[in-house]
Amino acid sequence: MAEQEEEEHDTAAETIAPSLPPSRVKKITKLDKEINKVNAEALFLVSCCTELFLEFLAEESARVAVEKKRRTVKLEHLRVAVKRHRPTSDFLLESLPVASEPVVDRPKAGERNRGRTAEKPVPAGTHRIDDFFRKDSYRC
C-alpha cells in the first residue's frame, strides 16, 4: 500500500515540458486572422498535441519504411502513413508535396559542383519552410 502511494506521488511530481519553443508556437497560431490572443494553457496544449502528433507521424512513417525494407524514412513513406490514417489524411495529404522522381545519376564527391546550386521551384499552393522564418516574405 505504501509503495502504491509513493508511485502516485512520483508521477504527480513529474511535469511535462514541451520541447517546442512557446514563442514560435504562438507566432504560428497567430497566423490565423481569427486568433487575437492565446493564453498560456492553450499554448501549452497546442505544443503538447503537436509533439504527440509528430511522434505519431514519425512512428507510422518508420513502420512503413520497415515494411518496405528501407532504413531511411522518405517522403513516400510519410505519404503512405498519412493515407493509412483516415483522420490525418483528410487534412494533411493534400498539403504534402508529391514525391518527385528518383535521382538517376548522382555525381560523386570529387565531381560535385562546388558552387551554389539554383533553388528548385516549389509546387503550386505550397510555401517553403524557410519562408516562415523570414520577417517579410510569408504571405498567405
Image (cartoon, grey):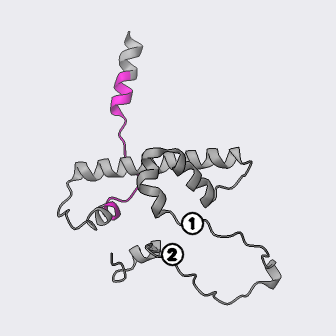
Residue 20 against residue 66 in the figure, above or below: below
Residue 78 screen position, x and y as percent? 57, 54
Q: How crowded is mark 1: few (under 14 residues within 10 Å), some or many (20 or more)?
A: few
Residue at the spot x=39%, y=73% of the render?
Answer: 132
- Membership of 61 in magenta stretch: no
Q: Is residue 132 left or right of residue 121?
A: left
Q: Tell me the amino acid under the disc marked 1.
A: Val
Report the number of numbered marks.
2
Q: Do the residues labelled 1 and 2 touch (CB within 8 Å)?
A: yes
The quadrant in which residue 66 appears is top right
Residue 25 screen position, x and y as percent? 33, 60
Tell which of 7 and 100 is nearer to you.
100
Residue 123 against residue 92 in the figure, above or below: below
Q: Is mark 2 on a helix, strand or loop?
A: loop
Residue at the spot x=30%, y=66% of the render?
Answer: 27
Q: Which of marks 1 and 2 is nearer the N terminus?
A: 1
Residue 123 against residue 63 in the figure, above or below: below
Q: In this view, does 41 lie to the left or right of 6?
A: left
Q: Residue 98 carries which label?
A: 1
Q: In this view, does 50 lie to the left or right of 62?
A: left
- Quote the CA–CA distance across marks 1 and 2: 9 Å
- Membership of 21 in magenta stretch: yes
Q: Name the residue under label 2.
A: 123
Q: How crowded is mark 2: few (under 14 residues within 10 Å), some or many (20 or more)?
A: few
Q: Is residue 101 left or right of residue 124?
A: right
Tell which of 108 and 121 is nearer to you.
121
Is residue 18 in view?
A: no
Residue 110 screen position, x and y as percent? 82, 82
**Magenta region, residue range:** 8-25
Q: Tell me the amino acid under the disc marked 2.
A: Pro
